[in-house]
Image (cartoon, helix red, strand yellow):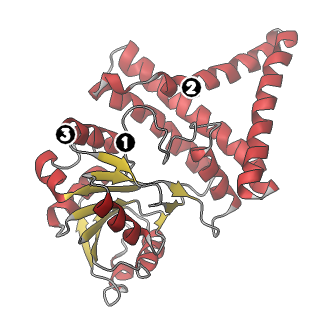
Amino acid sequence: MFFSIIIPLYNRPQEIDELLKTLTHQTYTQFEVLVIEDGSTNDAKAIVQKYEQLLDVKYFFKPNEGQGFARNYGFERAKGDYFVIFDSDCLIPEDYLEIVKNYLFEHHLDAYGGPDAAHQSFTPVQKAISYAMTSPFTTGGIRGNKKHIGQFHPRSFNMGVSREVYEKVGGFILTRLGEDIEYSIRIHENGFKIGLIPAAKVFHKRRTSFSQFYKQLHFFGRARINIYKHFPSELKLVHFFPAAFTCFVLFSVFMNILWPALAYICDFILLVYFVMIFFHSWQVNKSVKVAFFSIIASFIQLTAYGLGFMQDFFKRVVFKQQ
């Protein structure tokens, strides 16, 4: 099996340097790498060229259109039997392709996704953000977990599709705002089999600061409504949880001003919730500092997603704006 690894890139030369370095250590070596520079003003051509003697790597520069169409650009030029998509802010374990290859030979999948985790080199903030995105107290632990809601939708930071899928379904039709979920739904609808490879994890940096994390999750909340506009049945009750949490927090703030007696109840519920997050993160990460930051990251994860979700829900669903 020959893999084509496709990495869209936009103004992140340091990230691609770190990612390519991890790919030089892969135990399974039947792969090529296509780096698609999507109109960056700070390009990584010189960095990618450093790896030409170590990897079968190709560098392409194209006008900026967004990550979905950058991946399509790579699909069109890929030689592999399987196309593997990574985000540029990922580090890849050395046995990743070995795990995927062995799993695909034993369990036929036309497309797959894998989980993400925090690397030991991550900062406490990055580890807290990773926790918030995978915790049973925030996302329900369903990201990268077999116990997902409804159909499994691979996420584009760690996703693979067979050449057969690409030839029949084509590439991404959205460049952002839930483009990976939309793509996997079309793969399902064309009769292909998609599954999770639990051991095929990547170390996903996500964002390095809470402000960047807020912007990303606000965007994710809006993306869920974008998916709903294309596929109404994909909006589940669980997707409303961050918005409900956000409304509860706002209600608690107003109660502290208008009705302090009731506010005590709300505040106690929030306190218990955050204490559970603290101790669970402490158990998982073995760090009090990361556990404290996990409270902040979880709060941001829920409220940013909730606000983005509500913004586009009222704008595009209630008021029917484009």
Residue that numbered label 1 is attached to: 153
Task: List x then y, in percent, for residue 242.
Answer: 57, 28
The residue that appears at 60% across and 39% down in the rendered structure is: 301
Quadrant (top left/top right/bottom left/bottom right) for the C terminus? top left
Which of the two discs, 2 and 1, labels the residue nearer the N terminus? 1
Q: Which mark is residue 191?
A: 3
- At mark 1, the secondary structure is loop
Which of the two discs, 3 and 2, labels the residue nearer the N terminus? 3
Task: List x then y, in percent, for residue 122.
Answer: 63, 65
Q: Is residue 153 above or below residue 124?
A: above
Residue that numbered label 2 is attached to: 241
- Confirm or deny contact between disc 2 and disc 1 (CB under 8 A): no
Q: Is residue 139 above or below residue 113?
A: above
| Distance CA(mark 3)–CA(mark 2) | 31 Å
The residue that appears at 48% across and 60% down in the rendered structure is: 201
Amino acid carrying mark 2 in the image: Phe
Task: List x then y, in percent, for residue 136.
Answer: 62, 39
Residue 322 shows in the view: no
The residue that appears at 67% across and 56% down in the rendered structure is: 125
Amino acid carrying mark 1 in the image: His
In-image side of 177 versus 21 (left or right)? left
- At mark 2, the secondary structure is helix
Question: Which is more foreground, mark 3 or mark 2?
Answer: 3
Task: List x then y, in percent, for residue 21.
Answer: 45, 79
Q: Is residue 104 above or below residue 296?
A: below
Which residue extends farthest left?
168
Of residue 77 and residue 189, the one placed in the foreground of this image is: 189
- Near mark 3 (Cα within 10 A), the count class, few <14, some 14-19 or many ≥20, is few
In-image side of 301 versus 174 (left or right)? right
Question: Which is more foreground, mark 2 or mark 1?
Answer: 1
- Near mark 2 (Cα within 10 A), the count class, few <14, some 14-19 or many ≥20, is some
Q: Which mark is residue 35?
A: none
